[in-house]
Image (cartoon, rainbow, N blue to C red):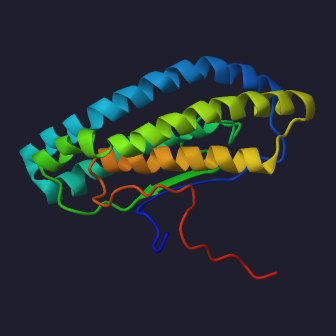
Amino acid sequence: MGAQYPATFEVTRPQKFERPQVFIRIVVYFLLSMVTSLAYFGLPIVAAIWTSQKGSQKFLDEDGPKIAGWLRWTTGLTAYVYMLTDRFPSDEDTSVRFDVQPSGSPTIGSALLRWITSIPSAIVLGLLQWVATIVWIIAAVQVLMQETYSEGLYDFQCGVVRWQTRLLAYHASLVDGYPPFAFDTGPETRPSA
């Protein structure tokens, strides 16, 4: 990916995962399913209504931070369920970082059209989430046995959450650019070893 997408997700991996959290995640999974379904179908409607009432720039300036805050909480919940962190989303938890740089000029039509234009990315995300469920089961067994799980599985789960985060930011009309079909975060500046 040439440039970093304006919606980013990063998470700090805990050194050890707490075994009881595995069982709590099973219950929270059903809450997450409802929240993401509502987000997928509701965000374009909310964006269209608020854009029609205020105009695109005022929507991004006034309502963008509210929607971004809601997406931040949803991303934190997803990271918790996908076993990327052991902390339920809260303002004090800094292990999950979500940021979006609102851009573009959303209109009523462009907001509603995102239901259609996002279908390819949503289909791929749906397939990835099925795989993520299998990965979750493997990771849960590893966490129950050794309080951690493999780096490759962790990275895959991060990629799925990152994909969802980008798609929801696009769906909310906070960014104009179509979300990339990629797990990466963009160009990285890692310290040289």
* Residue drawn at the location 64% of the way across and 29% of the way down: 133
Q: Position of residue 49 (x, y in %)?
A: 13, 38
* Residue drawn at the location 83% of the way across and 27% of the way down: 141
* Frontmost residue, 10 versus 94: 10
* Residue drawn at the location 69% of the way across and 51% of the way down: 155
In the rendered view, would you say 67 is above or below 6? Answer: above
* Frontmost residue, 10 versus 61: 10
In the rendered view, would you say 101 is above or below 37? Answer: below
Q: Position of residue 172 (x, y in %)?
A: 30, 45
Q: Quadrant of the C terminus?
A: bottom right
Q: On the rendered structure, is 84 left or right of 31?
A: right
* Residue drawn at the location 43% of the way across and 58% of the way down: 180
Q: On the rendered structure, is 90 left or right of 86?
A: left
Q: On the rendered structure, is 129 left or right of 20?
A: left
* Frontmost residue, 52 versus 121: 121
Q: Residue extending furthest bottom?
A: 192
Task: Give residue 37's quadrant in the image.
Answer: top left
Q: Position of residue 104 (x, y in %)?
A: 23, 63
Q: Is residue 90 visible?
A: no
Q: Position of residue 142 (x, y in %)?
A: 85, 33
Task: Give residue 45's quadrant in the image.
Answer: top left
